[in-house]
Amino acid sequence: MLKPEMEDGQASLTDPQFRADVLSGLERRPRAIPARWFYDRRGSELFEDITRLPEYYPTRTETGILRDIAADLAARVPEGSALVEFGSGSSTKTPLVIDAVRPSAYVPIDISGDFLRDSARDLSARYPELFVLPFEADFTRTLTLPRTTEASPKLGFFPGSTIGNLIPLAAVDLLRAMRGSLGEGAHLLIGMDRIKDQAVLERAYDDEAGVTAAFNCNLLARINRELDGNIPLDAFRHRAIWNDDRARVEMHLEATKDAAFTVEGRPFTIAAGETIHTENSHKYGPRDARILLRAGGWTPVAEWTDPDGLFAVILAEAQPERPAP
């Protein structure tokens, strides 16, 4: 995949899929742009800031679960597994899994290449005996993993409830792509956020300091920078809304006034009050989570949660598929 970044005024190739998703997303009604395009370098940095906010419970809650389950996880995962992290970001939770299962290799996969390589260097310095093989790619597709890991059993790691960013149909497709990448017999350790009080959820996605708002609005800045856009950034505001019918928090960029702009020379208009839908964060009850995993080709074998039931970490296995009961 082409590196979709331009840093410090230096031009770079723009991912053609980013261009296609933005242009089609602005043309469609209602407007929507896939959340994966948040993560240029600045977006990745802002997301790491979000994870440290007092309102944002998922990161600290999942981290606590991973600390508590280390011994149990080590007993359930084959020795010498290659650890493959999907959407690795800064890999802040990864040491907890490395210390627990002592993998033979670590393959972090992320779409933000520079951020990925920085994180991989930091982790390699922390674990000098561990093979660290950063892989810049769109992990929503089935991937051919580095040959170094071919002989090892695989443990996929997908923390942070990122699966919730996808509508259920796309989430199932992603889980099946992960199964295809990791192979039959692999394990997947995945985080899933639970349904809870609406006020708690909305605060987590609309923090008082405005970091999530900056993260959302950075998408427009990226479009301007990489796609020769002139979107007026001051004409949009961040909104986070709980959609109870679909059990998800939605993030939108709402126009605060009528605006006209171009992206790659193509004209667009938006009226005050209209929005660009930028992210979903689906929340799952225990049964919902297990059904989703099974639909994606994974059999849950263990599940852990915090004392308040805010968040769940599930270990699943890619068992042989059965065509019938």
Image (cartoon, rainbow, N blue to C red):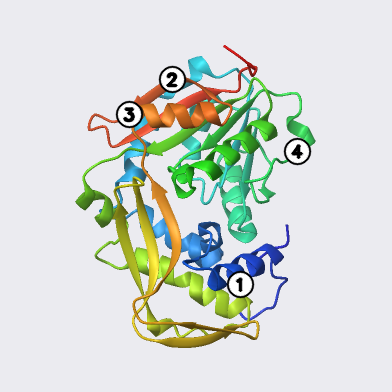
Whether residue 28 is visible to the viewer of this picture, yes or no, is yes
What amino acid is labelled 2 in the image? Ala
Q: Nearer the viewer, mark 3 or mark 1?
A: 1
SS for dot 1: helix
SS for dot 4: loop
Q: Earlier in the sequence, mark 3 or mark 1?
A: 1
What amino acid is labelled 3 in the image? Thr
The residue carrying mark 3 is 305
Query: Whole-Å distance between the Cαs marked 4 and 2?
Result: 28 Å
Question: What is the x, y in percent for residue 280?
Answer: 42, 53
Q: Nearer the viewer, mark 4 or mark 3?
A: 3
What amino acid is labelled 1 in the image? Leu
SS for dot 3: strand
Query: Whole-Å distance between the Cαs marked 3 and 1?
Result: 41 Å
Taking 12 as reference, is 293 left or right? left
Q: Earlier in the sequence, mark 2 or mark 1?
A: 1
Q: Residues within 10 Å of mark 3 (few under 14, many from 20)?
A: many
Q: Nearer the viewer, mark 4 or mark 2?
A: 2
Whether residue 92 is visible to the viewer of this picture, yes or no, is no
Residue 258 against residue 154 in the figure, above or below: below
Front residue of 293 and 68:
293
> Which numbered tag is attached to residue 146?
4
Q: Earlier in the sequence, mark 1 or mark 4?
A: 1
> Which numbered tag is attached to residue 23?
1
Query: Whole-Å distance between the Cαs marked 1 and 4?
Result: 34 Å
The residue carrying mark 2 is 302
